[in-house]
Image: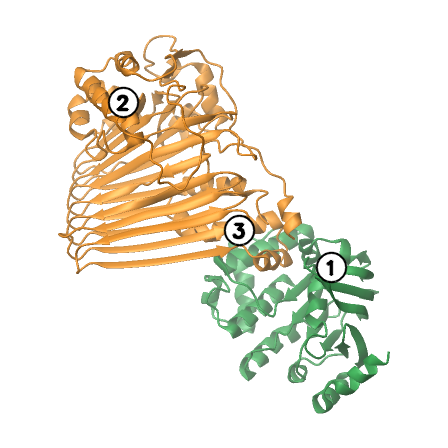
Chain colours: A green, B orange
Amino acid sequence: MNLLEIKNLHAKIGNEEILKGLNLTVRAGEVHAIMGPNGSGKSTLAHVLAGRENYQVTSGEVIYQGKNLLEMAPEMRAREGIFLAFQYPVEIPGVGNSYFLRTALNEIRKHRGLEELDALEFLGLARQQMKLLEMDESLLNRAVNEGFSGGEKKRNEIFQMSVLEPRLALLDETDSGLDIDALRIVSKGVNALRAPDRAIILVTHYQRLLDYIVPDFVHVLADGQIVKSGDKSLAFKLEEQGYAWLEKDAANL
Amino acid sequence: MTASIESLATQDYKYGFVTDVESDVAPYGLNEDIVRLISSKKNEPAFMLEWRLKAYRHWLTLTEPTWPNVHYPKIDYQDIIYYSAPKAKQPGPKSLSEVDPEVLATFNKLGISLQEQERLTGVAIDAVFDSVSVATTFKAKLGELGIIFCSFSEAVLNHPELVKKYLGSVVPVGDNFFAALNSAVFSDGSFCYIPKGVRCPMELSTYFRINAMNTGQFERTLIIADEGSYVSYLEGCTAPMRDTNQLHAAVVELVALDNAQIKYSTVQNWYPGDKEGKGGIYNFVTKRGKCAGINSKISWTQVETGSAITWKYPSCILLGDNSVGEFYSVAVVNNYQQADTGTKMIHIGKNTRSTIVSKGISAGRGQNTYRGMVKIQKGATGARNYSQCDSLLLGDKCGAHTFPYVEVKNSSSQMEHEASTSKIGEDQLFYCQQRGLAAEDAVSLIVNGFCKQVFRELPMEFAVEAQKLLNVSLEGSVG
């Protein structure tokens, strides 16, 4: 069964239409990379799927695990297993990173009919995942993203993702602003999550990330539509030739 | 998102019930006869009556202050009842069993059953219901340590020498309009004296509740910590829902002698008025502590969530060398509430230190003003102050204002001031929701994070209550 099915999706912010008839099907176990020039709608797609309300869906449909995703509140989507790793994670002063994540995890567990974890059980789980991501445990006791470096914020996103164990992970330019070492570590965290019952959508500008997280499919988004799909070799071609040749194609669609 | 959060259900004021008890009520209005009546009702000695009359005569020469950043229709001071006491079945209840069961039931509804308190919690409560102290728990146990904790009226009768010595020593009768009014007509309140070297073994607590209609509540609290003693004092407030505004003008005086410490915590939850701004309590309170002795310390922590109007500046006079003053505050306004609150730290002694942490939260059409003064006198060599004022805005119809005043007359002193204003962003909310939190839970999480610095100063059980109150106060408020 398809995990996610996007059909002819149109979405706008304010009066500007950004997604203009996007189609995409994602099956469990797959990793999809979405590439494309600035302003093509990559981040919009991630946010629309996560339920950000300042984007207005004007037509089309999104079926997630057989349900109409667009009717679900953002927190319900999260509880149903959609996770968005933000490009710019926000700071929440005074709220402990550990407390925040445990609250989130327990909301999701409650939704799935599982027992809530107490602070101690959670700590065990958290420590395990932090080790994998080579994160300093002291980050657990700091406020959510407050005073974190850019790299720490991105790692914290992946850490949250690995604790929350989503079914569909959306990574919005997680590689931007990361140095090579951080990129390697973040990729390791993402790769550890690859599983037959889970899908990942990577939004990225650069082929570089795909050296570490090898996608099953690469899609090029231009002017609000997917104009080209292929395997990893498509990413190499983009790296060499840029997007211009595809945008010309898009104009002729 | 704006629309969805604004539509979150608003919880109604939970403490809005009226207790049907027979009251002993004075006629409307204020004049010397009323002052005499109050004094005689309480069988006060002559010095108290004189003190009250002096205050009343001074009050007549004063005008209501207009400098606070709050707006309300003119108060008719002749249209208020200045004394209302629940009629005792026998004069002067001597134990809980003699207290009107209806009154006790009111406290039970509030979840602070005195019997419960006495039996289970180890918190001694002096409950002020309308204008008289209903009962004081734990009196006997405290008495063994020489601690005096009783209603103000009892203190006047049983410990006149202490009352005479300290009453008005921090807030003089003529201090300000509302303090003078209180001095003239205060009906009751709490009195506490901790003798030399005694560490009070439990949190002392007062619970204020306004019940009768058109009644002003004017309570007076006086706490004296003698040399080397320590006390932690809690104050909680509620009032029933009324369409008309009710006046509350209290005075709290704290005196800390050499090496003594007083920790005073307030959770104020008076009725704030309805969503249209109708009704609610006018809370015009003068709170001041005097660090009279060396190495003494006074710490104010307040969580202000209620009242239509709050006008309140718990302050410290740092007279003794090395004395310490602290002020930790969370003030929340929602709907049409207005708060003008802050503190004054007056450094007189050498090496005196003060800390101010103020967190203002504005929602709905609420207006929140921080007004603080730090004054460092000529002799206050080595004085230090740290001030931090943060404002959080929820929605775009509310306001946050900050008026810090600084007056430094000693060049060896140090002052630091930090201020910030932020808005709960849709970004923060969406981030929390994307992790599975419902919008209202996300708001309370963010707000509680913002207030953390203050909440951790509160005694544990109070901190829990404060968080709950905050959540209730802010429900349906985010845009």
Give x and y (percent) for residue B148: 23, 27
Provide the residue designation for mark 3.
B445
Element type where label 2 sits in the image = helix
Hey, what amino acid is under mark 2? Answer: Ala
| Mark 1 surroundings within 10 Å by alpha-carbon count, few (fewer than 14), some (14 through 19), many (20 or more) | some
Hey, what amino acid is under mark 3? Answer: Leu
| Mark 3 surroundings within 10 Å by alpha-carbon count, few (fewer than 14), some (14 through 19), many (20 or more) | many
Q: Quadrant of residue B232?
A: top left
In front of the other: B425 or A69: B425
Whether residues under marks 2 and 1 lie with C-beta atoms below 8 angstroms apart, the answer is no
In front of the other: B69 or A38: B69
Provide the residue designation for mark 1.
A56
Element type where label 1 sits in the image = strand
Q: Which chain carries label 1?
A: A
Hey, what amino acid is under mark 1? Answer: Gln
Provide the residue designation for mark 2.
B184
Identity of the residue drawn at 45% across and 56% down? B421
